[in-house]
Amino acid sequence: IADVGESTIVCRQPNTRAKLFLAVDVQARGATMQVIFSERTAEMAPYRVANMCNLPLLINQGQCKQLQEPRVVDEVLPHSHAPFAWEQVVKEPKLALHVGSQRRLICMDDLQESGAITVSDRRGGASQTLRYRLAADGPVKVLQVLPTSSGLSEGSPLPSVGLTLDDGRLRFKIVVTLSSVGLSLIDESPRELLYLSIFGIHFSYQASLGSATISTRVQRLQIDNQLFNATFPILVQPFWNEQELQQQSRPPVLELLLQRRSNADAIPFYETLSLRLQTLELMFDTVLVRILTLFALSTYADLCRLIAALMPALGIATDGEPQQVHKMYIRWLNIQPFR
């Protein structure tokens, strides 16, 4: 527990012999190390073994100095799958895969690992050659054991196990288009300090059986300094180069694309999170900074009450109690300027 982080272990319950997946989260709180134990569902196990052949498999953690006799041994029946986790946390753990009289030690964290296993027929028949490979299904690392005649190449996509397949049919769609939106920031005088104007807003949301997509585009954005005799009347505006200024239709200021697997309930799983932003000019003077600082101080108490009310609703502990960190998985993250 000297290292901050999270791991998942598996054990057998003494009475029912059922498997129990346990998340161990080590957090640093000042000078105190907090260790949080929580039960984890089988769908959130870090590994999975998919048996795609006609022979049963036996799996367990490989023997090591810290684990002389594995206590959790599972049988994976043909054409089924089983979650897997380490019962003893060691530096370089390996999974022991048993097929017939053959045994292989496999590093589950090496997605490049693959190989073949030749299993002889005990009744004197022809031997059978199986292949195994590692692949990623979102945040789960999957060991596939399949016959050589399966037709799946080394780079073929991994079939999702335990998820509802997406048929591609559109179940729901909504599109919102706004010409412009304006928002003013006014102090208690009352005096207008800033004016935000957003033009060409396009928002769309569509969902199928297994995925949901959110797309947002803003054509232009500007924040005006509304103070009298301001040194810089425009606080924020897009910066266009000479080529873009000559175009009849300029590039948008902001584009956001979010694609999520709606059938992955165990952990938020985003296939794509892409944010593209146009170069912006920021111009301010000391007078504006001073006035905005005074405005923030005057609303400090209201902001504290708002944050205090929102934190319990967001699942954030405010009484110093240990909390489990919420996680998400993003397959492709893209944040870049337009040029």
Image: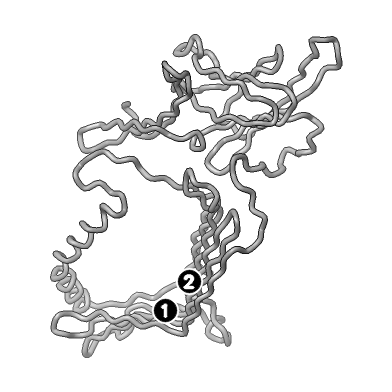
**What residue occupies the far bottom of the structure in this picture?**
229
Q: Nearer the viewer, residue 260 or 278?
A: 260
Q: Earlier in the sequence, mark 2 or mark 1?
A: 1
Q: Quadrant of residue 1?
A: top left
Determine which residue is flagged by label 2: 254
**Residue 148 placement (x, y as % from top left):** 79, 30
Q: Residue at x 43, y 84 (%)?
A: 180
Characterize the local packing of mark 2: few (<14), some (14-19) or many (20 or more) Cα atoms within 10 angstroms: some
Q: Residue at x 57, y 62 (%)?
A: 207
155 and 207: which is toward the camera = 207
Are dots 2 and 1 in contact, CB under 8 Å? yes
On the picture, is 93 further left or further right than 302? Answer: right
Horizontally, is 325 left or right of 338 in the view? left
| SS for callout 1 | strand
- Percent across and percent down for residue 147 are 77, 29
Spatial CA span between label 2 and label 1: 9 Å
Residue 92, percent from left and from top:
50, 23
| Vertical comparison of 263 with 258: above or below | above
Q: Quadrant of residue 39?
A: top left
Vertical position of residue 330 compared to residue 281: above or below:
above
* Local SS, label 2: strand
Question: In this rendering, would 149 be left or right of 319?
Answer: right
Look at label 2 and name its amino acid. Leu
Please tell me whether residue 247 is drawn above or below residue 107 in the rendered image: below
**What's the colour scheme?**
one colour
- Residue 194 is left or right of residue 42, and the answer is left
Mark 1: few/some/many CA within 10 Å (<14, 14-19, 20+): many
Q: Residue at x 47, y 81 (%)?
A: 178
Q: Which residue is mark 1?
A: 221
Type of the residue with mark 1: Leu
Is 278 in front, or is 245? 278
